[in-house]
Amino acid sequence: MRVRGMALQLTVIGMLVAAVTAAPEFPIAKPGCSDRCGNVSIPYPFGTEPGCYLDKPFLITCNDSFNPPKAFLTTSTINVTEITLEGKLHVEKYIAKDCYNASGRTRRIKPTLKLAKFIISDSDNIFVSIGCDTVASLSGNLKEAGSNETKYTVGCMSSCNSLKYVPNDTCSGIGCCQTSLAKGVDDLNITVTSQKNHSGILDFNPCSYAFIIEEKKFNFSRSSLLDLENVNKLPMVIDWSIGNNSCAEVKTNTSACQGNSTCYDPDNGNGYLCRCLDGYRGNPYLPNSCLGIFFYRL
Ligand SMILES: *[C@@H]1O[C@H](CO)[C@@H](O)[C@H](O)[C@H]1NC(C)=O
Ligand SMILES: *[C@@H]1O[C@H](CO)[C@@H](O)[C@H](O)[C@H]1NC(C)=O
Ligand SMILES: *[C@@H]1O[C@H](CO)[C@@H](O)[C@H](O)[C@H]1NC(C)=O
Ligand SMILES: *[C@@H]1O[C@H](CO)[C@@H](O)[C@H](O)[C@H]1NC(C)=O
Ligand SMILES: *[C@@H]1O[C@H](CO)[C@@H](O)[C@H](O)[C@H]1NC(C)=O
Ligand SMILES: *[C@@H]1O[C@H](CO)[C@@H](O)[C@H](O)[C@H]1NC(C)=O
Ligand SMILES: *[C@@H]1O[C@H](CO)[C@@H](O)[C@H](O)[C@H]1NC(C)=O
Ligand SMILES: *[C@@H]1O[C@H](CO)[C@@H](O)[C@H](O)[C@H]1NC(C)=O
Ligand SMILES: *[C@@H]1O[C@H](CO)[C@@H](O)[C@H](O)[C@H]1NC(C)=O
Ligand SMILES: *[C@@H]1O[C@H](CO)[C@@H](O)[C@H](O)[C@H]1NC(C)=O
Ligand SMILES: *[C@@H]1O[C@H](CO)[C@@H](O)[C@H](O)[C@H]1NC(C)=O
Ligand SMILES: CC(=O)N[C@H]1CO[C@H](CO)[C@@H](O)[C@@H]1O
């Protein structure tokens, strides 16, 4: 009997989970506001039109001249692919390259990224450089609460004259090097250069590459040394939060967290985030949105 009861309970929970993950069953945008741009859902505090977003950093520019339309962070060229209510913004970022052929340099790209308000996620991303004649560096500004910005630099160097020394499928330091990021980076430059113009290795590695990438989406194989020449952008994660003050500093009544929700401090950067109380679901930044999960009919 008890076993039967438990099995039934499990089924009910299974159905609930299915019902909850199947569709966004609660409104995610303010009434009268658009909640998508092409394939990207836009939950408040983000929004695409005046009156639809919390304040300037949360503006998403939706460009309809693309099909499907593309979402950009504020008025920048930073391409947004996903926004989560848990404080993550998934974007696409250019990779740094220094490319050669037998006559010399053919192409050099040095991307910079300056975020007005948000922070590059140190828990989701890594810094990677790839190449067999490669010196890469990342220099960034660290923003810490209550102090001035400080600069930090990390570098990676790798050199290999034959593909056979490059382990396949692991970023081992030979032909591929990776490091973690510091907390609080909001502004960075990535540079990559070669020392010998890739001479003698042009057939399997014509370019040096460096980039920040979402760790989960990173895969290295020997063919990356060649194939990345044709890849321009890779996915990266940005941490967003509201305002400049922590939950403790924001008075309960002035925080943007609405009914049936609670305030919490992000792991990275200033500001605060909101979350529906346990057993409630909705957009905690919208009034009357966090409702008990039994409100949602199976
Ligand atoms: C994006 O939307 C288009 C139609 O608007 C659809 O064909 C395509 O599969 C979608 N892509 C993704 C990755 O969801
Ligand atoms: C949309 O993208 C096109 C092509 O890149 C560009 O010319 C145009 O200025 C963009 N429009 C807006 C509103 O950003
Ligand atoms: C934006 O990201 C999408 C999805 O990855 C990509 O297909 C597209 O080329 C990017 N657009 C621009 C303008 O960078
Ligand atoms: C190298 O590339 C340049 C332009 O990208 C081209 O003009 C030149 O012919 C190339 N040299 C060789 C040896 O392929
Ligand atoms: C690399 O190529 C540049 C021209 O692109 C040339 O000035 C330089 O001398 C070359 N260096 C080496 C080590 O071959
Ligand atoms: C990045 O480069 C720009 C222009 O070269 C410079 O003004 C800025 O201070 C650099 N930022 C960092 C974090 O090094
Ligand atoms: C920040 O910089 C300003 C001016 O450069 C200086 O007066 C102040 O003491 C610095 N604050 C900290 C916390 O280092
Ligand atoms: C390296 O790994 C890739 C991806 O797993 C695989 O497709 C390829 O065959 C491997 N190459 C060698 C030389 O083992
Ligand atoms: C946060 O601080 C920045 C710069 O100090 C300021 O421009 C901005 O208005 C502040 N934002 C809020 C919501 O207080
Ligand atoms: C918040 O608002 C409620 C009702 O308006 C009031 O009773 C309470 O004292 C306020 N709390 C603070 C910390 O301002
Ligand atoms: C809190 O949740 C309850 C139960 O779902 C709902 O009746 C109530 O309106 C919610 N309150 C707010 C302020 O959203
Ligand atoms: C960084 C990198 O090499 N990413 C590659 C991982 O694999 C996918 C699909 O195989 C490629 O599209 C990426 O470029």
Image: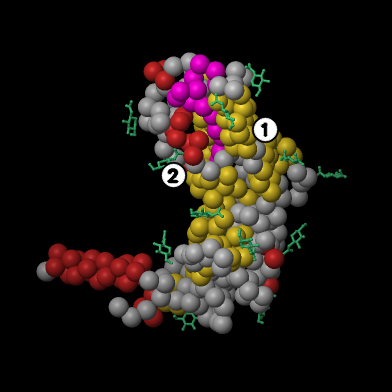
Image coordinates for residue 167, horizontal then vertical, percent: 39, 23
Residue 44 drawn at (x, y percent): 57, 70
As displayed, is residue 77 above or below residue 56?
A: above
Magenta residues: mostly which secondary structure? loop
Q: Residue at x 48, y 77 (%)?
A: 27
Camera-side residue of 72 and 98? 98
Tag shown at residue 247: none
Tell me which residue sits at (63%, 71%) in the image.
53
Quarter of the render that holds ligand 5: top right
Residue 44 visible in the current orientation: yes
Position of the N terminus, as image quadrant, is bottom left
Q: Residue at x 42, y 20 (%)?
A: 163
Identify which residue, 196 or 30, lies in the foreground. 196
Farthest left residue in view: 1
Q: Residues within 10 Å of mark 2 (few under 14, many from 20)?
A: few
Q: Residue 204 lies in magenta, yes or no? A: yes
**Color theme of the render:** secondary structure
**Where does label 2 land, which residue?**
217
Give how far apart the Cα atoms at labels 1 and 2 are.
Answer: 24 Å
Q: Is residue 237 above or below residue 131?
A: below
Mark 2 C-beta closer than 8 Å to ligand 12: yes
Image depth: mark 1 or mark 2 in front: 2
Residue type at the position of mark 1: Thr
Q: Give the left or right position of residue 7, taking residue 29 as reference.
A: left
Q: Which residues are magenta?
A: 198-212
Query: Helix, strand or loop at disc 2?
Result: helix
Q: Which residue is mark 1?
A: 153
Mark 1 crowdedness (10 Å alpha carbons): few <14, some 14-19, many ≥20? few
96 left or right, relative to 81: right
